[in-house]
Each structure stands twice: as C-alpha cells, then as structure tokens.
Image: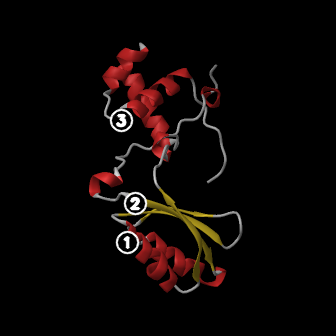
Amino acid sequence: MANRRAQLDQLDYDIIQALHTDARIAASEIARQTGTNERTVRKRVDRLVAEGVIRLTAVLNPQAFGYVTAADILLDADPEQEDDILKKLMSMPEITYLAFGQGSTEMSIEARFKDNDALREFIRRVLPAIPGLTVTRYALVPRILRNIDEWMPPREDFGID
C-alpha cells in the first residue's frame, strides 16, 4: 500500500469521531451534531470508505467468547518456506495479528486463547510443527490497554487545528 495522505477536513474529522464513538450512529444524527446536511454526511462516509480512510466493520470482543489469554509471539521464518508458513499462520483462528518484523525473517503475531494450557500447547507444539518456523520469544499479555480499533490520529493529521 502506497503512503499517501488523504485530503481531509473538519467535517471528515467530526464524522470519523462520531463513528469512532458509536459505529451505529445514524447519518441524520451526525448531520444534526455537525450542522450539516444528512446527504452530505452519507456522501462523506462513502468517500472515506472508498478512499480507504475508514473501514466499517464489527469488532469482536475475544473475552465475550472466552478468549481471556493473549500473547505476543515473535517468530523466525525460513525465507524458502515463507509462503507455506504464511498460509498456515493465516488459517489459524488463534492468531489475531500477523506482521513481518524488521529483519527479513522475523514475524510477529498476537494470539488469543481460552486458557494458559492452550497457549502453552500452541507455543510448544503447534507452531514448532510448522516446517521452517521457530518461536524466538513470547510474552503473556495480561491486559491490552489500547487496540487498533481504538486508535485515532491527532487532529493535525486531518489538516485542522
């Protein structure tokens, strides 16, 4: 994905803030709050989605499904087997986040589990069973303070004061 800066203004910021607070808020309510026409709000939301500025999606709470244990796991992947490793990792429901690290063979994952025994099994047996993959280290995450669904860039990134 190319680095590009979307052209945003105060109304975009206000719309995004409203959706960030309550994704189910009606366009008519955003229009009322911002003093804008409802049709303008709908068009802005459509543009923000089309330009990839926002995604409208449901974010699940893992704890509601009993996934109370989270871990950050760092991996080392054999470059010759990277495609197969990625396919296997992407298919694992435990993994909530997967990214390449700074080094050419490093990968970082976040995974969720119902208990510590499941985490231990995943780290000691499941991941090492993938050819070309090595667990280099991991950390139990006792509490996540901010997740990507809660992140918001500063106002100046919108081109406003």
Label 1 close to label 2 by CB (< 8 Å):
yes
**Residue depicted at 58% across the width and 35% down the height:** 153
- Residue hosting label 3: 23
The kind of residue on which mark 3 rests is Ala
Q: Secondary structure at mark 3?
A: loop
Please name which of the two marks, 3 or 1, marks the residue nearer to the observer: 1
Residue 45 is at least partly visible in this image: yes
The CA span between labels 2 and 3 is 27 Å
* Camera-nearest residue between 61 and 154: 61
The CA span between labels 3 and 1 is 33 Å
- Residue hosting label 2: 69
> Residue 110, position in %: x, y?
49, 61
2 or 3: tag closer to the N-terminus: 3
The kind of residue on which mark 1 rests is Ala
* Camera-nearest residue between 96 and 17: 96
1 or 2: tag closer to the N-terminus: 2
Q: Residue furthest right?
A: 103
Q: Is residue 107 above or below residue 149?
A: below
Q: Quadrant of the N terminus?
A: bottom right
> Residue 26, position in %: x, y?
31, 27
The CA span between labels 1 and 2 is 9 Å
- Residue hosting label 1: 118
- The answer to whether 65 appears left or right of 137 in the picture is left
3 or 1: tag closer to the N-terminus: 3
Q: Secondary structure at mark 2?
A: strand
**Residue depicted at 34% across the width and 46% down the height:** 58
* Camera-nearest residue between 58 and 26: 58
Q: Secondary structure at mark 1?
A: helix
